[in-house]
Structure formats: structure tokens, C-alpha cells
Amino acid sequence: MEKNFWLLLIMLVVPFSAVTIWWITLMWAMKATTGELKHWLTPNNTLKSVAIIFITIGTLALAVLGILEGSLVATIFSGIIGYTLGTTFDKNN
């Protein structure tokens, strides 16, 4: 159980730190530029991006803990990929 705890902790800390670095980088880039990222970084696009990240993290955590089987994890990931490829992100407000 302790091995699963540390593995789960690493799996949760790495994506959360990556999201934090991503957010700080975007804010820094918007401060340093004239704000062209504001046209893409709408609330709708941000919500879609964060939802994809959290679903991926949750699925990986449940797979590591042995709650989900491999075939179910593959189905969830294929759904995430299909959603990502099928979704058109807003280009303007």
C-alpha cells in the first residue's frame, strides 16, 4: 500500500506542478506581449483544457490504485483523445 501511496503522490504532484508552471508562463507571456493570447485564452478554452488534464490525472490515479482495469482505462483515454480531436476551440471571443 505504501508503494501505491508514493506512486499516486508523484502522479498527482507532477501534473499539478505542470499546470501551475503552464499558468504562470501564460500570464507572464500575456504581460510581456500585447495580449494576443487573450484571444485564445477564453474561459471556454481554459475550462476545456483543465477538464482534459483533470480527467487524465483521475483516470491514471484510479488505474495505479487498481480500481480500474486496463480495458476501461484505454476506453476512457480513447474518449479523451476523441474529445480533444473533435473539439474546436474558440478562436475569438
Image (cartoon, rainbow, N blue to C red):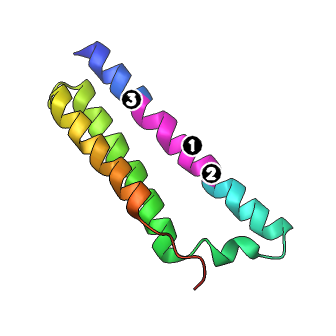
Q: Which residue is mark 2?
A: 22
Secondary structure category for the residue under label 1: helix
Q: Are marks 2 and 1 in contact (CB under 8 Å)?
A: yes
Q: Main secondary structure of the magenta part?
A: helix
Q: Which residue is mark 1?
A: 18
Where the N terminus falls, by quadrant? top left
**Residue sitting at x 57%, y 86%:** 93
Q: Amino acid at mark 1?
A: Ala
Q: Nearer the viewer, mark 3 or mark 2?
A: 2
Number of other residues with Cα within 10 Å of mark 1, as a class: few under 14, some 14 to 19, many 20 or more: few
Q: Position of residue 12 (x, y in %)?
A: 41, 36
Q: Amino acid at mark 2?
A: Trp
Q: Amino acid at mark 3?
A: Leu
Residue lying farthest to the bottom in this orientation:
93
**Residue sitting at x 50%, y 34%:** 14
Q: Position of residue 42 (x, y in %)?
A: 55, 76
- Residue 39 is left or right of residue 14, and the answer is right
Secondary structure category for the residue under label 2: helix
Q: Which mark is residue 9?
A: 3
